[in-house]
Image (tube, grey):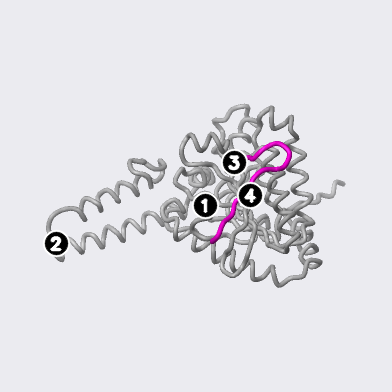
Amino acid sequence: MQQGNPGLAFEQPIYELEGKLDELVQSSGDNSAKHEQIRELRSQLAGLTEDIYSNLTPWQTVQVARHQDRPYTSDYLGLIFDEFVELHGDRRFGDDRALISGFAKIGKYKTLIVGHQKGRTYKERTACYFGCAHPEGYRKALLKMRMAAKYGLPVICLIDTPGAYPGLGAEERGQSQAIAENMYEMSRLKTPIIGVVIGEGGSGGALGIGVGDRVGLLEFSYYSVISPEGCSGILWKNHEYAEQAAKALRFTAPDLLELGVVDEVIKEPLGGAHRDHHKVAANLKRFLLKTLGELTAVDSKTLLADRYEKFRRMGRFREDVIA
């Protein structure tokens, strides 16, 4: 948590209790009564945090997924992977900073990493278009994934975007075609692909690197066909209904797991990933190593067949007989 950051509105009771605990810890005196008070406050704090985070609404989950202190792809590169070598450019237009790509090692595995990057400061966020990739970003990602398949390297995609960049220039350079081509080519890429939604998983911007043999989701992330604000704007012609839209979209971990959109929910630390980068990175690393072990043992023909069936099984539908 950054110094002076007030946190999210629903987290205020947590910060108030943390403030009391800090005051007590820093107060003078060192006796058994003080230690007992500290233990009691810490117990209350853990209970309160667990109670709040066990009952988040979908809109509150979106707020956590967008938290400015939540770890991004660049953070996980340092916490999980070794020997990262970044690869740039799409050989056509330029190098999109909203999508990072490169070779890295995790445990005994050599992999290719592709991930959205939002940036911390305003300058970084502007350079990364707030995690909204252009067509050249998706073409860069596909170019590197094809290279990984050529050398038999598994691909790991870290998804964190509100959606693909919606500007005129992106449309002129073929935004929808770039995303569609990525989805098509990833569906038949002869190498293991693991996707993990680490924050926001919005619209085609997420799907452009989201077709994989396994798709994981951090506990307080969301994965949706559209952002709540976008849905609200289309259905109600007003962004004020974003909270209602978030509930209707069913894009939080329990719903996504039930619908088969994701394969596994990765536990976050108490109070969310923004409170403990190292712990969430350790949980994510365990998931990646376990999944790499499972997928690298499967031959490419079976891998492609299973990938196809996975996406065919997604969702629910109902057939009504009309008399």
SS at badge 1? loop
Q: Answer yes or no: do the residues labelled 1 and 2 have beta carbons within 8 Å? A: no
Give the residue pinned by disc 3: 97
Q: Is residue 188 above or below residue 223?
A: below
Residue drawn at x 76%, y 65% as measured from the top left: 303
Main SS of the magenta segment?
A: loop
Badge 1: residue crowd in 10 Å (few <14, some 14–19, many ≥20):
many
Q: Quadrant of residue 294?
A: bottom right
Q: Nearer the viewer, mark 1 or mark 2?
A: 2
| C-alpha span from label 1 to label 4 | 30 Å
Residue drawn at x 70%, y 52% as measured from the top left: 144
- The amino acid at mark 3 is Arg
Give the residue pinned by disc 4: 87
Residue 55 position in % (x across, y down): 47, 52
Q: Nearer the viewer, mark 2 or mark 3?
A: 3
Q: Nearer the viewer, mark 1 or mark 4?
A: 4
Q: Which mark is residue 30?
A: 2
| C-alpha span from label 1 to label 2 | 39 Å
Residue 281 position in % (x across, y down): 49, 59
Mark 3 vs mark 4: which is more N-terminal? 4
Give the residue pinned by disc 1: 220
Q: Nearer the viewer, residue 79 or 57?
A: 79
SS at badge 3? loop
